[in-house]
Amino acid sequence: QVQLVESGGGLVQAGGSLRLSCLASGRILPLYTLAWFRQAPGKEREFVAGITWSSGISNYLDSVKGRFTISRDFAKNTVYLQMNSLKPEDTAVFYCALARAYSRRVDAYAYWGQGTQVTVSS
């Protein structure tokens, strides 16, 4: 059983930065993918970024490439999402999720955190 706990959300002005953290309790196997999703009001939950635990290979939503960076810390069992040059359209609840293999599909992820709110003001 894996539990995921996010932190680091908040209110920031456009152009600013935030770093989200996701602490994973339990064993994470080498091929597992940890990912960040987001859900804005009235919209479907969407994949933002994912990283394969062992290799560190990462993938991003096109609209965040060059602005967001996903990384992981083995010693702390933690995944991070560094978000720079934030835009009002990035406003959403951000969720950390774990899957047995890489996917951008919500239904591929069996474990989810509780979510953390990110609000970007214009």
Image (cartoon, helix red, strand yellow):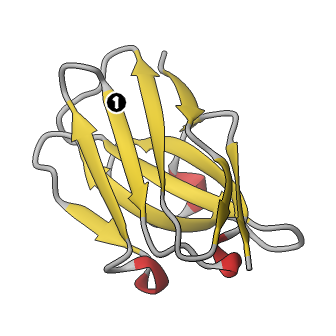
Q: Vertical placement of 95 versus 77: above or below?
A: below
Number of numbered discs present? 1
Seen as rendered, the residue at the extreme bottom is 62
Q: Vertical placement of 83 versus 5: above or below?
A: below
* Residue at x 34%, y 30% (from the top left corner): 78
Q: Is residue 102 visible?
A: no
Determine whether, in the image, residue 28 is placed left or right of residue 111: left
Residue 26: image x %, image y %? 39, 14
Determine whether, in the image, residue 111 is placed left or right of residue 32: right
Residue 66: image x %, image y %? 31, 79
Seen as rendered, the residue at the extreme left is 55
Q: Quadrant where the C terminus lies? A: bottom right
* Residue at x 54%, y 73% (from the top left corner): 86
Front one among 43 and 68 = 68
Seen as rendered, the residue at the extreme right is 42
- The 10 Å Cα crowd at callout 1, few under 14, some 14 to 19, many 20 or more, is some
Front one among 101 and 40 = 40
Q: Is residue 34 visible?
A: yes
Determine whether, in the image, residue 54 is placed left or right of residue 79: left
Q: Element at badge 1? A: strand
Residue for badge 1:
78
Q: Amino acid at mark 1?
A: Thr
Q: Vertical placement of 67 versus 4: above or below?
A: below
Front one among 120 and 65 = 120
Q: Vertical placement of 58 versus 89: above or below?
A: above
Instruction: Place residue 72 in its image quadrant.
Output: top left
Residue 71: image x %, image y %? 26, 48
Instruction: Place residue 90 in its image quadrant.
Output: bottom right
Residue 8: image x %, image y %? 56, 39
